[in-house]
Image (cartoon, rainbow, N blue to C red):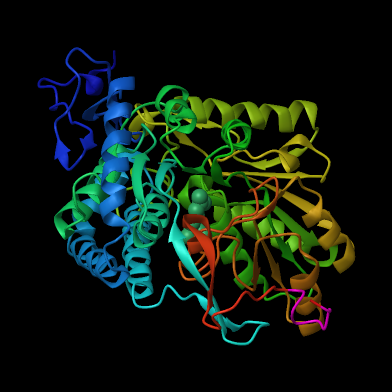
Amino acid sequence: MKKSLLQSSRPKLHSHFINGRWGQTAPNGKSFENRDPANGQLLSVYPEATRRDVEDAVAAARKAFGMWRQVPVAKRGEILLKAMRFLEERKEPYAHAMTREMGKVLSETRGDVQEAVDTAFYYAGEGRRLFGQTTPSELTDKFAMSVRAPVGVCALITPWNFPMAIPSWKILPALLCGNTVILKPSSFTPDSARHLAEALQEAGVPDGVMNLLYGSGAAVGIWLTEHPGIDLVSFTGSSLTGSKVGETCGRIFKKCSLEMGGKNAQIVMDDADLSLALEGALWGAFGTTGQRCTATSRLIVHERVFKEFSEHLVARAESLRVGNGLDPKVQMGPLINDAQRAKVHQYVQVGKNKDGATLLTGGQILCKGDFENGFFYAPTIFHGDTGMTIAQEEIFGPVTVLIRVKSFDEAIQVLNDSVYGLSGSIYTQDVNRVMRAIRDMQTGITYVNAPTIGAEVHLPFGGVKRTGNGHREAGAQALDIFSEWKAVYIDYSGKLQRAQIDTHGSEA
Ligand code: UN1
């Protein structure tokens, strides 16, 4: 073992949060380590939930649901507002802890905590809205409306790339709507999930309403998904896992929202502001070390500006400072773990050898000097074609593919040549192209003169095609995941009125 991996004293074993208590860890249970991907340091140790823990959490959440669903929505919103204040106050320590456990640079982890703050603010306000509809009845002396009802107990399964933001997108609207939840965060970012849970507990979320279980997707994720006491599963992660979650939920009639892969493209037209497009491409492709489902993994560039754009892009990528995200000068941190780095490197080999793409820069594992104990990878740019594996499959690392096109129509065609449809972007000054792009891009999120990353929390987040299963997170749309619409008719005529019959002149 390398020297820096050795630790004299082992950090304390954390525990699950079940029924308002920390510390119900099963004796002699399995545990896992949380390590810093920049240097391998051991940060914390967590238990793997057992079936017993799952049973306890589901029972607690089921019991609490009866009470929580009747707490006035405005009151539920106030608790979220309090949680928002705690998160805001603790942004700095939480961001530091997040950079340590997942590697992205501090400005980005501050942004991640901020995204949870914004989400709490948004849904706290929803506590004074949660609008339904009233609509005239087709009959006299009859009143009609629709109201939202909670779904029940929700299992929330979240990834490591947005360790606080993504759990907050799920927990906060779920709680606001009156559901109770069990969060199962990624085992690579348990500290951030714990911090979010602590803030919610301190803000006054009652016992059993929010529970937190650590452990693998293959065990705990599956147990939760299959459990008859869970009414809804909301999952963000890989398409492979998402399809299994969807399959299981489909089989047992469980509500399910899936947020999965992307192969997002930025189009750069010949009339684009090239320096702006360049900044956008660098941020979109290499921000979060390319580990965003919204990352710019394809750059579709008009042939007239291709040479100039690609030369500048390569030069700028080569000057990006890679290193420990805690260093304020660093612009790109490590990948999350060795397996992810190996996967990225494997794709690079496929790009070079099988696809026959031209490697313009990068393509190497960085492992010397300061990089020795971390999972660093060089910012990588290929020149390729749309049919290549590296232009089709999600890599989830700092790798992007330049594709040369001859026209706007071809650019849109290439952008849509993907099984995914999360975000897309176009850089152009031509309003007609902008409008056509908005109409024709097969994406859930469309950017104009802005990169493919950077969605705001009050707008719907999600994608078409294999990116999702038709739901949208964030904004008012997330309420549709976490509530059921209930139609209500109140007849005050004192007689039987037959819809569709008594209003249309039939002889009764
Ligand atoms: C993700 O990549 O999984 O729009 C989420 C963005 C962020 C969220 C990304 N606000 O890039």
User: Who is closer to the viewer here, 411 or 47?
Assistant: 47
Residue 487, image x and y in percent? Answer: 55, 67
- Number of numbered discs: 0
Determine whether, in the image, residue 54 is placed left or right of residue 208: right
User: Who is closer to the viewer here, 466 or 246?
Assistant: 246
The magenta segment is 500-507
Say which residue appears at 23% left-offset and 18% top-offset. Answer: 3
The residue lying furthest to the left in this view is 9
Can residue 297 be seen from the camera position used here? yes
Say which residue appears at 36% left-offset and 27% top-offset. Answer: 372
Q: Quadrant of the C terminus?
A: bottom right
Q: Main secondary structure of the magenta part?
A: loop
Residue 297, image x and y in percent? Answer: 65, 49
Determine whether, in the image, residue 326 is placed left or right of residue 485: left
On screen, residue 421 above or below 19: below
Can residue 100 be seen from the camera position used here? no
Q: Is residue 491 magenta?
A: no
